[in-house]
Image (tube, helix red, strand yellow):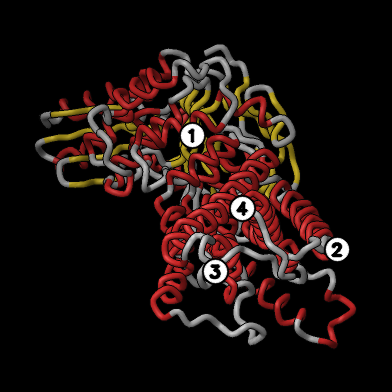
Amino acid sequence: MSGVPVIRSHALTKRFGRVVAVDGIDLDVREGDRYGFLGPNGSGKTTTVRMLLGLVFATSGTAEVLGHRVPGRVAAALPDIGAVVEGPAAYAHLSARTNLALIDASGPPGRAGRRTRRRRIDAVLETVGLADVGRRPVRAYSLGMRQRLGLAAALLRAPRLLVLDEPTNGLDPRGIHDVRELLARLNAAGTTVFMSSHLLAEVDRLCTRVGVMDAGRLVLQDDLGALRGPTGRVLVRVDDPVTAVRALDGHVVDRDGSRLVTERSSVADVVAALVRVGVRVDEATREHRTLEQTVLAVTGHGSDRVDRATGPNRPLAERSPS
Amino acid sequence: MIVVEIRKVLQRPRTWVTVLLLCLLPTLVAVLLAVTDIGPRPGEGGPALLSAVLGNGELFPAAALAIVLPVFLPVAVAVVAGDAVAGEASAGTLRYLLVRPVGRTRLLLAKLVAVCVFVLLAVTAVAASAYVVGTALLGDGSTRPTTTISGTPLSTGELAWRTVLVVGYVAWSMLGVAAVSLFLSTLTDSALAAAMGGLAVLVSSTVLVALDAAEAVRDYLPTRYWLAWVDLFRDPMLLHDVQRGLLVQGGWVVVMLVAAWASFTTRDVTS
């Protein structure tokens, strides 16, 4: 990881009328990152992505993508960016190939050039698994196929930065696996991946860094490794939980069948104490925070759930981790 | 980019269906005229020149344009122009074009050129099909010599280039509607709303042109000089209204394009 900034924003804010969709966020994505951009529905992820691509104009604050100011110089950055924004889109009456050719011909030829178009189209269709799609119009595609086509369009010009908004939406488990492998491979070859999602498991498996949005604010931004640090508690699975609880002498904070959570921090001490009273230990490990725990601790409900008096606009303190 | 947009228009089945339908109405009129031999009596309203085409199909291209000019042609143009940006927005492809990247000004210009190509295509298709149908069904001028509206004879060569002038003038007349619809197309994500808005302007203009109380603004309305092409079939040609017509359309195009540019380049694309 070279640490060169790829996306940086400072106090980036967007209001739609009276609604503050994005509220002063400071993004920091570096070259080589696999950045997972998390948050409940309506937390401002898509608006942020649109601002970074120059589709939506910020109310205040600044942003820089690949070293170019957005939106003023976004045209200089965009040729090196491949994007899927809020789902794929294509001309429904045309085939995948024609769609890719049209979108490629629309913009400046750039370093990829016009002559290589056919070859590049064949290559990306192969890459996303649509090589044999033929001349059928996109109208006849399944959602998963459209998602693959959207990804193909994003990859068509071998971008340095991939900005993907919910790229696995509509894919089956096989497709999700394919996309994850593909992104990991591209990343290994030097492509920075910025991926928004509300699927924690996806981000957990793929990403190296995460940013978490909630109600328009970036409430968390850190390396995934740091977030998954130990909690200072120990998990054990034993054959005789009743004896074990007594042996651990009030240090057990949670019990689920044969699985105990103790607030002691040393695995060795816990195992020794249990063995001393003749309890057999099947499993003993330090407890790590999961990404889900971390994210749920810092976010509220998405905007699609509207509860009385406890909407997403509750003060931060109320939903801090207990 | 311009080539791509033109290709998009030409690859759409809808474009060709529209053109076909536009050609169909004059053809139907020609068939009815040929079968019944009953022409509208001169001076009783009805499209200009229609009474003159009986027995001579060479004037029928002009008559055909007169048939589609008031309603059908502007409807088709408003639909295509209204769809230009709003259609891309509602299909979701607008955002992908813009991040490709295609500059917004560039996209707007390419769309305008594509709409112009469609207008020319439609007008030419109507004129050409009308010539074929007219000469086949109504005779080719050998039975009855072609005359201008003023009654002087018209050679085939002269008729041909006057018809070309009419095609050009009618196409130019459509640009006002096209520009209004294109402007509305940048404001909304609904192609239908943009087309309807363009038609609303058209209908208002038609109503006001016929209203004596609106005399102060009448000469600046987009439809005011639409029928001035008839003057091209007089001898000598009366160019006063034609020139005014060209200028007024040009004015509408410029104003609406500036408005479209201003709205499109400053707008959040949230579609």
Above-or-below relation of A316 to A265: below
Q: Which amino acid does label 3 sit on?
A: Phe
C-alpha distance separating marks 4 and 1? 47 Å
Labels 4 and 1 within one chain: no
Furthest residue to the right? B216
Residue A135: image quadrant is top left
Q: Residue beneath label 2, please?
A: B240
The three-letter code of the residue at mark 4 reads: Thr
Residue A29, label in figure: none
* Disc number lying in front (4 or 2): 4
- Residues indicated by labels 2 and 3 sit on the same polypeptide chain: yes
Secondary structure category for the residue under label 2: helix
Please give the residue where the numbered disc 3 appears in the rendered image.
B72
Q: How many marks?
A: 4
Report whether residue A256 is seen. yes
CA distance separating discs 1 and 2: 46 Å
Vertical order, B233 against B271 (above or below): below
C-alpha separation, residue under disc 2 versus residue under disc 3: 26 Å
The residue located at (76%, 68%) in the rendering is B225
Residue situated furthest front in the rendering: B143
Q: Which x, y percent locates residue A55?
A: 62, 43
